[in-house]
Amino acid sequence: MAHYEDSQTQRAGARFIRRSMAEPMLSREHEFELATAWRKRQDEAALHELIRSYMRLVISSAMRFRHYGLPVNDLVQEGSVGLMQAAARFEPEREVRFSTYATWWIRSAIQDYILRNWSIVRTGTTASQKALFFNLRRLRAQIEEASGTSLDDTGRSKIARDLKVALSDVESMELRLSGSDQSLNATLNDEEETEWQDFLADDRAGPEDSTMYALDIQQRSRWLSEALECLDQRERAIIEARRLAEDEDVVTLETLGQRLGVSKERVRQLENRALGKLRAAVLDYSRAPRELMQAS
């Protein structure tokens, strides 16, 4: 899936990166003061200074993931969201540097964004698939460098063991990473107008099958309508309430019994009798020569 940025957006992003990298580093004591002021007093000025000072972490993480083909500015924005989440959850009293804590949130936010936008096809949903997606290239490069050859089945098996995933998952992810999204409306080449979608099989019923199905439905509906005429008024009311109504409108045997002034068991008996009449009538209609002539 292609991602583009115009020149104005690129220049604005470059200016933001330069300003962020020029922000002064925080000492451990000043960082603790800012984090405490934000957590205990909701001091927005302290939060802004904390975020500006550690925006360099976001930029550094975004640069490490730029080879996935997504705009760096978008990666920086997503990493900034992770940085804000880290600031909202950071507990300064635990005596852990904010940079250490925030790095995990930043990386997680960027990775989630990449998984959502790298391809129009969902790439990874489980923790093992995510680990495979973000580590396959690195491990493959290490194995190929050590062996001097391209990745083979032995190398794929090693990756599967290292990441604790199935070998089939490694093979599938390798295939996904080696390709790219392509429109079905794209032509096969520049010399003809044939599109990729022209080679897709159409599993829908053909005109003849669709017509026969529609006629069959009409025929059965006519048989049922005629069969209902053989029921008395009470039997027809039961069938319409119990068998012909929408699922949410189906009436219980007890409710029908109260309407008709009979017991629930009697309603069940009447329903079974009516169904038997309908079944016999429909069979008679389906066997009648006149119906066969109409159906043909």
Image: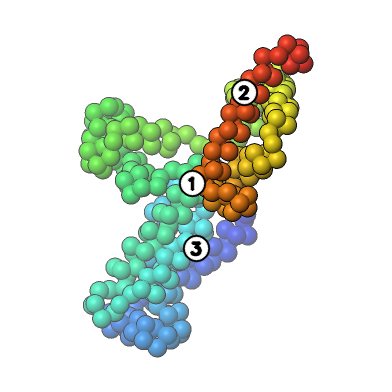
What x and y, as percent, mark residue 205? 64, 23
* Location of the C terminus (image quadrant): top right
Comes first in the chain, label 2 or label 1? 1
SS at mark 3 in the image? helix
Q: Which mark is residue 77?
A: 3
Q: Residue at x 49, y 56 (%)?
A: 72
SS at mark 1 in the image? loop
Q: Residue at x 67, y 39 (%)?
A: 236
Comes first in the chain, label 2 or label 3? 3
The mark closer to the camera, 2 or 1, is 2
**Residue most toward the bottom?**
41
Q: Would you call the spot at circle 2 few (<14 residues within 10 Å), some (14-19), or many (20 or more)?
A: few
- Asked whether residue 138 appears in the rendered view, the answer is yes
Q: Amino acid at mark 2?
A: Ala
Q: Which mark is residue 2?
A: none
Q: Are marks 3 and 1 in contact (CB under 8 Å)?
A: no
Q: Would you call the spot at circle 1 few (<14 residues within 10 Å), some (14-19), or many (20 or more)?
A: many
Q: Which residue is mark 1?
A: 118
SS at mark 2 in the image? helix
Color style of the picture: rainbow
Relative horizontal placement of residue 74, taking residue 224 as reference (left or right): left
Q: Amino acid at mark 3?
A: Gln
Relative horizontal placement of residue 189, taking residue 68 as reference (left or right): right
From the viewer's side, name the closer residue of 233 and 291: 233
Q: Which mark is residue 280?
A: 2
* Location of the N terminus (image quadrant): top right
Relative horizontal placement of residue 174, taking residue 70 as reference (left or right): left
Q: Image height check: is 45 above or below 185? A: below
**Residue most toward the front?**
262
- Asked whether residue 192 appears in the rendered view, the answer is no
From the viewer's side, name the closer residue of 217 and 107: 217
What x and y, as percent, mark residue 93? 26, 81
